[in-house]
Structures are given as structure tokens and as C-alpha cells.
Amino acid sequence: MTAASMRFMRTVMSKDPKNGRTAKDTHYANLRRAHRDQKRERGELPPSPPGAGRRKADWKAPQLPAETIWLYGIHTVKAAIDNPGRTLLKLRVTRNALARLELNDAQMLGLTIEIVTPQDIDGLVGPDAIHQGALLEARPLPVRKLDSLKDRPLLLVLDQVTDPHNVGAIMRSAVAFDAGAVITTERHSPTESGVLAKSASGALEMIPYIQITNLAEALEELKTLGFQTIGLDSEGPAPLEGTFAAGKIALVLGAEGKGLRQKTRATCDALARLDMPGAIKSLNVSNAAAISLYAARSHLAR
């Protein structure tokens, strides 16, 4: 071994008295950290807590300006940018994520784009957000009225389903079965947000999400527009597939556990159940919504 090689080995193997690490340890630690950062940026790992050495409990959400929301994740951000009804303000994005978004010149025109690191976005949206290196600041979507849905034959109504992950999954199913809207209450339901949009994986931009103040009154209005309102209830008197009796259907689903509220049950035209021959007799509300939408779409196709 040459003298130069021996000096190099002594340097690599020498330990930092403060932390006991060798230069070789530090080198490989840096490589591992860079590899983890790349995986976080691709969404393959959850983001690291915002700020070096800060604990999850220390993070506090920044105050957003009025009429502003943050949307994150590659599919969510791309769908929002593709949506002509969405007003875009600013895109914070890593270089890798910007390449994955594949934006054209027209989409980037007038959109402020800031190149950032994954850690920059972590600090804004928090340690639980899988942002994949893309964060879009935008305006909420325009409010839609129920009478704008009169020509859509299939609607989905949610009675105080509070979990944004469930509502996001329901939105995906609603888009898949070409429902005209997802209607829910202003109270005890998720607002338009990054969590809801990420869970919907782009579906928030593809279907109206209408929040109303009084669900019973909204159901009555849907009846005047020609919709048969059917509430899903495990104790319903008849199977869902035998309950359809109109050319326009509004399916009404309640929260897991408590189901439909009494006032909602009383307002629906009919109550129906999903018959399940297996040992498990109840489903997650998002799964129940998908099955109900399939049954309704099959009826409407006849």
C-alpha cells in the first residue's frame, strides 16, 4: 500500500470525537439520506418531519389566506392544472416532480412556479402528507347548485360521512360510474382540502362536490327535480336492486357505525339494503358506495 493510500485510509477511519463517526460513516449516511429523499419525492416513502430534528408534535399548519387551498401529490396537482374551472395561484415543486407533471407551455403560462426541495414542502403540509414533491396553491372550486344537476341521472348523497379518505375514495367510484355529483352537508363533512383531494387522486377535479346546509331540504329539492331518493340501510325492507323505480336516482349513504340519521331516513323515498351472503354483513362506506353505484348504473342502462 502506498503512503498516499495509507493517509487516505487513516482519514476515512479516523473518528469524529463528538459523534464517534468516521468519514466513511458520514459518506454513506449522506448517500442513504439522499436515497431516502429521492424516494420521498417519488411518494414511495412518507415525508420526513418538517425541519431537521423537529418532532411531529412540533409542527403547526401555516395560516392560509382566505379562499385559498393547498393541493399536493402528482395526480392531484396534474388534475387541478388540467381543470379549466380551477383558478391556479402558485406551484411549489421539485425538479423531479416538475418533470413528472409534464406541463406544456400553455399550462405554465401565468402560473408562478417555484423550485423547492421535498423538505420545503414538508414544512408547509406536515409530516403525514404524501406530497411527492408537488404543492399547488389554488382557489376552491366554484359552488354548484342542485338544479344544475337535473340532467344527470345518477347522484350520490352522503349523510355526515366525516373521514376525508372515505369521501375521496367515494369520489373516485362516483367518477368511475359517471355520477353527476357528490352531495354532502357543510357540517360534519370534509371541506375541500389537500387531504380530500389527495385521497380522491384527481377525482375532485372531475365531479362536483356540493355541500348543503340542510340535507332533508336538499333531498326534497332533488325529488322535485325528478330523482328517486334511496337510502342505504342494513335493515332496509328490500334489496337495492329491486327498489329502483325511476329514471333518475339519488343514492343516500350514512356514516359508518351510525348510518343514516332518522330525519334522513324519513325523507328518502325508499330504504334499501345490500344483501351479502357471506359471514360479514357490513361494508366500509366507500365499498358500499361503489356497489350501490354499480347497481344503479345497471338499472339506468336497461
Image (tube, rainbow, N blue to C red):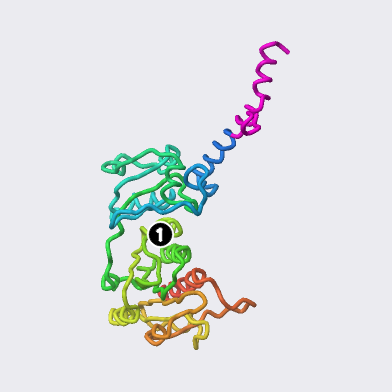
Which residue is at a point 61% across and 79% down the rendered structure image? 277
Q: For residue 36, which quarter of the picture? A: top right
Residue 97 on image: x %, y %: 44, 42
In the rendered image, the vertical position of residue 290 relative to residue 137, given as above or below: below
| Quadrant including the C terminus | bottom left
Is 72 displayed left or right of 47 in the figure? left
Tell me which amino acid carries mark 1. Ala
Residue 285 on image: x %, y %: 50, 72
What secondary structure predominates along the stretch shown in magenta?
helix
Instruction: Give the camera-side residue of 146 and 261.
Output: 261
Residue farthest along the top direction in this orientation: 3
Q: Is residue 236 magenta?
A: no
Residue that label 1 marks: 203
In the rendered image, the vertical position of residue 258 relative to residue 59, given as above or below: below
Range of magenta residues: 1-29
Secondary structure of residue under mark 1: helix
Q: For residue 260, which quarter of the picture? A: bottom left
Which residue is at a point 42% across and 66% down the rendered structure image? 174
Residue 12 on image: x %, y %: 65, 23
